[in-house]
Amino acid sequence: MGLMKRVGIRIGFGAAAAGFALLVMTSTAWAQEPDQEIADLVAAIDTAWLLIAAFLVFLMQAGFAMLEAGFVRSKNVANILMKNILDVSAGALAFWAVGWGLAYGFSGDATNGFVGTGHFFLVGFDDWASWIFQFAFAATAATIVSGAMAERTAFRAYLFYSVFITAIIYPVVVHWAWDGNGWLSAFASNPIGTNGYLDFAGSGVVHMVGGFAGLMGAIIVGPRIGKYGKDGSINPIPGHSISLAALGVFILWFGWYGFNPGSTLGLTGGFAALAAKVAVNTTLAAGASAVGCAFLSRTRVHNFDIGLTLNGALGGLVAITAPCAVVDPWAAVVIGFIAAPIVILGTEGLDRLKIDDPVGAVAVHGFNGVWGVLAVGLFASKSGIAEAYVASDSYGLLLGGGAEQLGIQALGVAAIAGWTMVTSGIMFLIIKYTIGLRVSPEEEERGLDLGEHGVEAYPDFQPSPSMGGIANMLAVTQPATAAVPATSTSAARGPE
Amino acid sequence: MGLMKRVGIRIGFGAAAAGFALLVMTSTAWAQEPDQEIADLVAAIDTAWLLIAAFLVFLMQAGFAMLEAGFVRSKNVANILMKNILDVSAGALAFWAVGWGLAYGFSGDATNGFVGTGHFFLVGFDDWASWIFQFAFAATAATIVSGAMAERTAFRAYLFYSVFITAIIYPVVVHWAWDGNGWLSAFASNPIGTNGYLDFAGSGVVHMVGGFAGLMGAIIVGPRIGKYGKDGSINPIPGHSISLAALGVFILWFGWYGFNPGSTLGLTGGFAALAAKVAVNTTLAAGASAVGCAFLSRTRVHNFDIGLTLNGALGGLVAITAPCAVVDPWAAVVIGFIAAPIVILGTEGLDRLKIDDPVGAVAVHGFNGVWGVLAVGLFASKSGIAEAYVASDSYGLLLGGGAEQLGIQALGVAAIAGWTMVTSGIMFLIIKYTIGLRVSPEEEERGLDLGEHGVEAYPDFQPSPSMGGIANMLAVTQPATAAVPATSTSAARGPE
Amino acid sequence: MGLMKRVGIRIGFGAAAAGFALLVMTSTAWAQEPDQEIADLVAAIDTAWLLIAAFLVFLMQAGFAMLEAGFVRSKNVANILMKNILDVSAGALAFWAVGWGLAYGFSGDATNGFVGTGHFFLVGFDDWASWIFQFAFAATAATIVSGAMAERTAFRAYLFYSVFITAIIYPVVVHWAWDGNGWLSAFASNPIGTNGYLDFAGSGVVHMVGGFAGLMGAIIVGPRIGKYGKDGSINPIPGHSISLAALGVFILWFGWYGFNPGSTLGLTGGFAALAAKVAVNTTLAAGASAVGCAFLSRTRVHNFDIGLTLNGALGGLVAITAPCAVVDPWAAVVIGFIAAPIVILGTEGLDRLKIDDPVGAVAVHGFNGVWGVLAVGLFASKSGIAEAYVASDSYGLLLGGGAEQLGIQALGVAAIAGWTMVTSGIMFLIIKYTIGLRVSPEEEERGLDLGEHGVEAYPDFQPSPSMGGIANMLAVTQPATAAVPATSTSAARGPE
């Protein structure tokens, strides 16, 4: 690439003596060979797609941050946001140093089905577009966990586990499922079974890892104070802002259009039509699940519950993430409708087991991740597999394609859930018995914002006496009756 | 598309024994014929543009949600957000099942100028990129209505009318104006007049439908309690969060770059330059209208009013939506400046008629939708029409192109406004006299969040005694003096 | 481009008697010549990239708005948001009328190294994609200033200086550095030194201009009441919403993927790989700086401070903006880590000088803008410069490329800082001594929202007695003890 081209592009803006050169002309001037030109165009459009998709997936960090912030109490908002900004930041360094290398890296011929072996710190590597896309996925897996463990997990513990998931636990699963050498991979030269494990955009690889690590974390850190009464009661602890939670879901849904359609990894070679079908399926599953949760919530809690409906949309998105490329739109609708009860009953079931997940991440990402993986084995069409992978006679059980694929998908579920729960369980236990996993009860009552970060998220507004940070802090240190005069309380808030 | 390509793309990440294959190489390896390669590239870039534009338009749902949430009182926030999440969700199912079929569907040769006749449930259909783009537009039309009817409309009524608009009312207008067989369509083989009705991105098709359906809804559901005094006074009811409203406008403006430039539907064939011009015009009209409203608000309410300025930006965006492809930038500035008084005087006029539109949707989308459609007949340039449609001697009246186009645009306004007002009027009346359109006065006072959904949007914060949800709830059920002690009230808030 | 193509594209949706025409077919039908086809594809992909990048940069306006709103007190939220919506709106008109012309415009052969000379009001101009991209950059430079001067600057003064920066101060710097005739420009036929001044996406051109104009503004308008005690104390004035600030940072980071990778201005001609590398470097620098600030804040203020961490991410983004195209990823990490102390010590240093910058804009954009420009001279690799500009033997000092480039970068810093501080200083002084730069002390205490705009941003919520708008308003007009009864205060908020 010579001087003329480089100058030409930028000079397009300037006032070259020869006049104003259009981009079209300057850009094509350098090209000599049609084949080379076409290869350059293919690289341009495929890279553009991968980068833009990566950027949309990155924006999901904003979605998770708003969702998780909205679903926690105001006294823990700065803490959860700090976790969100740092998991993507520290995660970037971790995925640069180690994560990519364990997922896709290799060194010479040395490789294996279990883990990548090279390109640490991206030495000798230059597939930058793939790195940024995969990094955005890794950050998604890691950030899911913070929601399930919100409102009581110590910040130092968080920093450790977040980096460990991004650097180690998640990349290994990626290697299994998506690397050309992975033992589960559909892209292996001799895949397991006929097609290998099919997980187009990561219901299992990304969401199950985040969800099941969150499950282990929620179990090991224990429930928030006051969530489960000694009499067996389950006490709702409403989040502080429905607005932020709803904003988060809209942003996440938007970002999912990078997550799923972007997983074609390019648009040339006929993938454009596939990416478009994936976008349609993603939309329909999210819509069906949100509608399903709205109506189902009415039968379970006598209301159109907005928290469950928001999580419903997310559950449908998680569920369609694996099958989005291989099912027809009608099946996306069915998959979405089935995602709805999984969100609601999953959330209820965890509560019954006294596993406290403040934002519903386990049911949304973990359980619906399982459902999405299995749905491939049930609903994948013969033409869908041919379009997204390689033509095969093994496809969805319900479409007459036999049980083999469903079996492989179940194996994938078992492997991913097993790996994630064992490794993250060990990790959380080590943290618990070394640096400590949980804040003190005093700090939890007072709020993690003041305790861990010395700030209030909303210093200009009066908290409700019954809920807010300062009031709770006072309640810990002095008699509640003195701290909150009855007249003030009843006047401003009344009984609930 | 054979095995090698599919594997190649994904293996690009992996550690194939033969080394690391760049995307460029794997992707081009399969292609045999230059013509086929170029057709593939054209499909890739045009599809990419349509998909990305669709995603940006989808994000407008987040913008509308934040705008509408910000402009209502805190006691109705969860309700309006629930409506926003469900209109896109139920709308996806409705546009899949029915909407597309009535807009663009056909069955064999059976078609007509009034309504589409096939492809229901997308059977026999595979133009996925077009579906997702058109769906995002349909969701926009539907969500406009919820703002105009906010803070008093029953949720069950909302569910019904929202689906009906997405499935029936809106798609018929699309068929008229944008389908190749529509009686108004510029794409018909024998369009009405010389050019047919010109509405590039839908000032009429989308925004007038949303705005005029909202107008009928606002009239039929009636004003909020307390909005209009018996003495003829008009009482401002400020929204609960300027921050969310402003965020909504920024997101909407961003999403409009999908809405308008994306309406080229592709970038090849010379459309790239047109899309760029559309982006410039969109920016200038929005800017001019916001500036206009800021200064005009100063003369009307003695302040730089932020609510009107935010709606001013939106009004400019709506107005430029029809003419964005056929006018020069100077005309975009003029169109934007004229949009400003339409927003402000339109809002004032509705108040004088006691038509209560809490978010200003009717003036922004309905009235400026009309202005945008007519502006085509005034400002469309000869070269602009040639670039975006077909070269013609009929163009903008003010540019010497005669009055014919203005006449056709006026016919389009009459047809769209008439259809929308009649069908939505009948629909709202049927709802009113069957399942009911409005919540009870008690529920309205208390807030729809508690009544319809059993939640508070912001449980951690003390509402202002004069405005908030709980305080109002108490005011309904017990004497206000007992509920809100005078000292507490005056201390925290004082007179307004 | 004939009739058939235009109709074909739109008819793709309709029910043409001949059946359903795929986009691929209609779009390619018109093309005759492979060369012409390839030129069209190049234009399409390069324009798509530039437009999408411009849209992402535009969304940074939402990010700045949320960041600045979150970092000010609730009584000044509507004011800062009004400034944000109007600087992009008035800025669009200013950059249309004057700004572009001074940056890149020319008239015939008349041009010079200091300032553009034509294309005012875009007369005789049609490079629309470049205009929208450059406009989005201009709006970024202008909006930075409002943060540094927040909470006490009069609105009329703001309108004037904002337009002046977008129309005059910023475009001149663009002409110097990026126009093909600019005296500093790397794209000049005889650039200064070997390579000219290298500032790929504008650490200097955009962020230094915004940051140093903000510095002059903050100095001349003076600190907020109460910020600096007479005893030399520095009083923190916490912003009203950590949530909005965090949202702003996530949106800004996302938008930066348009800012930096988009500055390739196209993707063909091999630029796709460069854009991807830029995205990776952008990510790593942001992550490193955020992590650095989180840990450094712990040593400075005994906490993981979220405000500093959020600004840390931004500081890293600013610092990598100039060198993103010419450094390797390891250097991006180093640059990011060094950005962290610049944010924290810069903020502390300004406070020691009693220069009050409520949002930290000067340290983030001004000081890290300087750092980014200089980092090119230290870390630019030989291959990096060849890839992004023209192969050269002058590159980063620390990589053995000599000191020349560092010298040129320092010259660029001096020129940009000097121009910006002198011109903006004169401008602010003229404003101060004519229409006035600052609101009255009464209005400042009461809040600019009520004083300038007659609204409250959050009318439904009770402000904290110690901080909020109404309480402060009362405190000005009547004795505080009467306004805020002790019992109510202590109950709801307690001591801080």
Image (spheres, coloured by chain):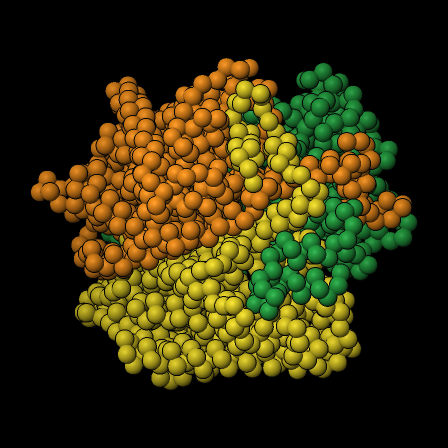
Chain colours: A yellow, B green, C orange
Q: To which quarter of the image does residue B98 belong?
A: bottom right
Q: Give the answer, above or below, for where C56 lies relative to A78.
A: above
Q: Give the answer, above or below, for where C442 lies relative to C332.
A: above
Q: Quadrant of the N terminus of chain B?
A: bottom right
Q: Quadrant of the C terminus of chain B?
A: top left
Percent position of residue A103, x then y: 51, 68
Res C319 visible: no
Q: Residue at x 45, y 42 (%)?
A: C385
Res A130 visible: yes
Please identify the residue farthest to the left as the structure is shown. C231
Percent position of residue A397, x then y: 73, 78
Please identify the residue farthest to the bottom as the structure is shown. A231
Q: Residue at x 45, y 73 (%)?
A: A169
Q: Residue at x 91, y 49 (%)?
A: B109
Relative placement, left or right, of A247 versus A472 is: right
Q: Residue at x 42, y 53 (%)?
A: C329
Percent position of residue A368, x then y: 57, 72
